[in-house]
Image (cartoon, helix red, strand yellow):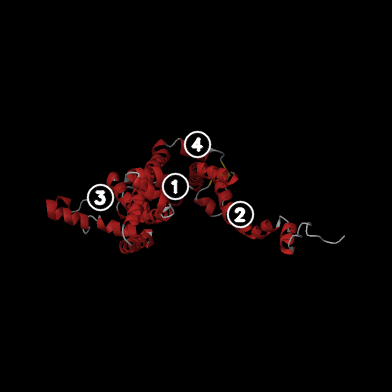
């Protein structure tokens, strides 16, 4: 039968080939990456879990067989009120403080970048990039010199103003001063990333919406609360979750400040505590159990965000 104008057009050949492409092709292309990631992350995780159920000391590193002890390592850390629980509570409180201070200052900087002119915005961007690009090791060492007992700027300035009673004073030995200095270091390094991310989100808000709210008489705080924050709520959620994870596994800054002069017993966080129990004391089995508990806490923190993301993708 001949083809008429009323017959439906035949699908293009390229579209036909795409429809016939088997569904396992994407999985085949991703298989190599999935295997590499599985080996690099799966084996260390499995090894960590296995060691957490063993009595693993320095002798086992020399080749002696490890003895299975069941949940003894977990029982040891869960009943250590002055050790594990004190460090965990200290880490959680520090995490909350760091996240709140970082998000507030980051939002203020992002809002300021929107209001200032192009030249000032460029100058602020350069300053933020310099602070962000500086390695944590170098930044912490510099802050340690600032509060040095004899040669630090702070002690010399206070000595010049009030007398010699500040000469030789150790700030880092005081836990409150230690965590105040630590907060300044961590926030100083984290604010640039948060500010840039929030600024990128705020620039996506249509100008017509902000101008209409301003014409209606909405104050700056009302525009922030009713328009800007709801518009970038997804970005804020991601930043909060990432900041919580980063701050909870804080290690470099705490370790360096302790090495300069901090009190190790009263200022250790969970990351440094795992290092002290495992590498310094040689109790690798107990340190592995702490690592497993720490991993469960991290998963509990990130689970609400992952569940919300999957729910939005399904919808």
Q: In the visual, does 261 lie left or right of 63? A: left
Q: Residues within 10 Å of mark 1 (few under 14, many from 20)?
A: some
Instruction: Give coordinates of residue 49: x percent, y percent.
Output: 56, 46
Count neighbours of disc 3 (C-alpha within 10 A) and say few if under 14, some if 14 to 19, many if 20 or more: many
Q: Which residue is mark 2?
A: 38
Q: Position of residue 35 (x, y in %)?
A: 63, 57
- Say which of 280 and 167 sits in front: 167
* Image quadrant where one finds the C terminus: top right
Q: Is residue 247 left or right of residue 286?
A: left
Give the mark nearer the N terminus: 4 vs 1: 4
Disc 1 secondary structure class: helix
* The furthest residue to the front: 5
Left or right? Give the position of 112 relative to 281. Answer: left
N-terminal of the pair, mark 2 or mark 1, is 2
Q: Name the secondary structure under disc 4.
A: helix
Residue behind mark 3: 171
The secondary element bearing badge 2 is classed as helix
Observer able to see residue 268? no
**Disc sitting over residue 75 in the figure:** 4
Which residue matches tag 1?
231
First of labels 2, 4 by sequence position: 2
Cα gap from disc 3 to disc 2, whole angstroms: 45 Å
Are the residues flagged by discs 1 and 3 in contact, CB closer than 8 Å? Answer: no
Numbered disc in front, either 4 or 3: 3
- Cα separation, mark 4 vs mark 3, equals 36 Å
Question: Looking at the figure, which quarter contains the N terminus?
Answer: bottom right
Residue drawn at x 58%, y 49% as measured from the top left: 46
Q: Residue at x 40, y 45 (%)?
A: 227
Residue at x-position 29% and y-position 50%: 181
């Amino acid at each position: 039968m001949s083809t008429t104008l009323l017959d439906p057009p035949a699908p293009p050949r390229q579209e036909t080939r795409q429809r016939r492409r088997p569904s396992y092709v994407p999985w085949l292309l991703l298989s190599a990456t999935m295997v590499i990631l599985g080996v690099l992350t799966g084996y260390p995780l499995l090894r960590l879990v296995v060691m957490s159920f063993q009595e693993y000391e320095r002798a086992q590193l020399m080749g002696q067989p490890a003895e299975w002890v069941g949940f003894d390592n977990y029982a040891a850390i869960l009943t250590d009120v002055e050790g594990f629980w004190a460090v965990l509570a200290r880490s959680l409180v520090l995490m909350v403080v760091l996240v709140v201070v970082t998000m507030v200052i980051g939002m203020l900087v992002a809002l300021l970048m929107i209001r200032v002119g192009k030249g000032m915005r460029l100058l602020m961007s350069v300053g933020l990039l310099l602070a962000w690009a500086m390695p944590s090791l170098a930044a912490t060492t510099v802050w340690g010199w600032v509060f040095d007992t004899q040669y630090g700027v702070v002690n010399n300035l206070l000595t010049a103003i009030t007398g010699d009673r500040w000469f030789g004073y150790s700030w880092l030995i005081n836990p409150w001063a230690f965590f105040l200095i630590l907060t300044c270091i961590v926030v100083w390094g984290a604010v640039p990333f948060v500010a840039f991310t929030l600024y990128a989100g705020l620039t996506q808000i249509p100008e017509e919406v902000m101008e209409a709210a301003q014409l209606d008489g909405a104050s700056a705080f009302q525009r922030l609360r009713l328009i800007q924050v709801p518009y970038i709520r997804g970005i804020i959620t991601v930043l909060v979750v990432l900041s919580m994870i980063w701050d909870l596994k804080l290690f470099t800054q705490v370790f360096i400040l302790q090495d300069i002069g901090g009190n190790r017993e009263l200022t250790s966080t969970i990351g440094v505590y795992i290092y002290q129990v495992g590498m310094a004391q040689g109790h690798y089995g107990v340190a592995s159990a702490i690592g497993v508990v720490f991993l469960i806490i991290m998963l509990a923190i990130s689970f609400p965000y992952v569940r919300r993301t999957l729910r939005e993708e399904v919808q």
